[in-house]
Amino acid sequence: MRPGRRILSWCLASLIAATPLAAQSKPGMLGYTDNPPRSEADHANVKPSKLQGVGIDQKIGATLPLDLSFTDTSGAVRPLRDFFQAGQPVVLVPVYFTCPMLCSLVMDGVASALSTVEFTPGKDFQVVVFSINPHETTEDAAKKKAEVLKRYGRPETTGGWHFLVGGQKAISRLTDTIGFHYAYDAEHNQYSHAATILLVTPDGRVARYFYGVEYAPRDLRLGLIDTSKNKLGSVVDQVLLYCFHYDPSTGKYSAAIMNIIRGGGVLTLLAIGLLMLVFWRRGKSTESTLKDD
């Protein structure tokens, strides 16, 4: 099978596999209604009181306040812009390091997905993990970083992973900018929050949200390529970006059916044109042979 047809076939096969995504609700989003429940179904959509106000408001295109100061694992106080490098997108992860369950699942998901993506933290992109708990310390951040790097399995990339703690003002401003809403549960001394990671452009603009605790390596790869303005990836990756587009409603890359149809139409026209050229040349060759006879 020729490369063009192989790519088209792969896109169409992926379209069939991805079709059910359109019917899914937003993963990681905590929806609720302000009206009293009228049925069991309605009741299922109402948030518990402790989760009121907890959720994610997508703010794609919002510019991060890169002047905010955070403290890294070495104890150095640095502006957020220090962790943004020219041409390198940023994986931004809002968690807290002493979280008993959800945050660890998020970080395991990040490490697992990125371990299958050949791009290198610190060279091709940066990972910035910041705590939403203003009482956490650099020791908490360093301990979590060591755990994640062990899970990731590439200790030489430590310079591309940044685990930060900060004061409440800096945390609130950053979480408000990205639409990450959480609440403190004093009874259990925990934070209620949704599970998400973001991709941010090298100049600090929010570009992508991925929800849940497991992230498809394909989506992360395409997101990094997309967010880097195509500075990462190969020609094949550019074709895949033509076949797939980011769907904010699902936080995933889904098949771009119109692009696939257009691509199929172009390939069909090229095939017809090639056949016509072959027949024309055969006709000319036959005519020349008859004249020689």
Image (spheres, helix red, strand yellow):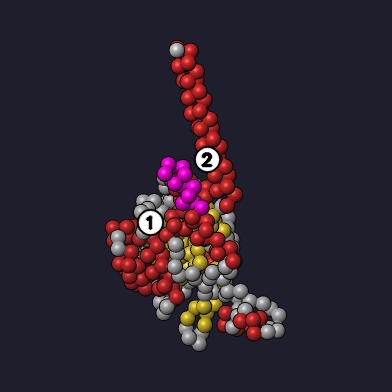
Mark 2 and mark 1: Cα distance apart in space: 30 Å
Indicate the quadrant containing the N terminus: top left, top right, bottom left or bottom right: top left
Q: Is residue 203 visible?
A: no
| Residue drawn at the location 49% of the way across and 56% of the way down | 14
Q: Position of residue 141 (x, y in %)?
A: 37, 70
Question: Label 2, on which residue?
Answer: 267
Residue at the bottom extreme, as displayed: 187
What predominant SS class does the magenta segment belong to?
Answer: helix
Residue at image point 42% right, 47% down: 233
Residue 166: image location, x then y, percent:
45, 68
Choose mark 2 or mark 1, whichever is in front. Answer: 2
Other-residue count near label 2 (Cα within 10 Å), few / some / many at <14 / 14–19 / ≥20: some
- Front residue (pair 66, 245): 245
- Residue 151 relative to residue 83: left or right: left
> Regarding mark 2 in the picture, which secondary structure is present there?
helix
Quarter holding the C terminus is top left
Which kind of residue does numbered mark 1 sit on?
Val
State the mark number for residue 136: none
Q: Is residue 134 magenta?
A: no
User: Looking at this view, is 203 or 1 the one in front?
Assistant: 1
Tags 2 and 1 touching, CB below 8 Å: no
Q: Which residue is mark 1?
A: 117
The residue at 52%/58% (across/down) is 16
Dot 2 or dot 1, earlier in sequence:
1
Q: Mark 1 falls on what kind of element? A: loop
Amino acid type at image mark 2: Leu
Q: Which residues are magenta?
A: 1-12
Q: Position of residue 170 (x, y in %)?
A: 51, 66
Image mark count: 2
Task: Name above or below for residue 173 compared with residue 225.
Answer: below
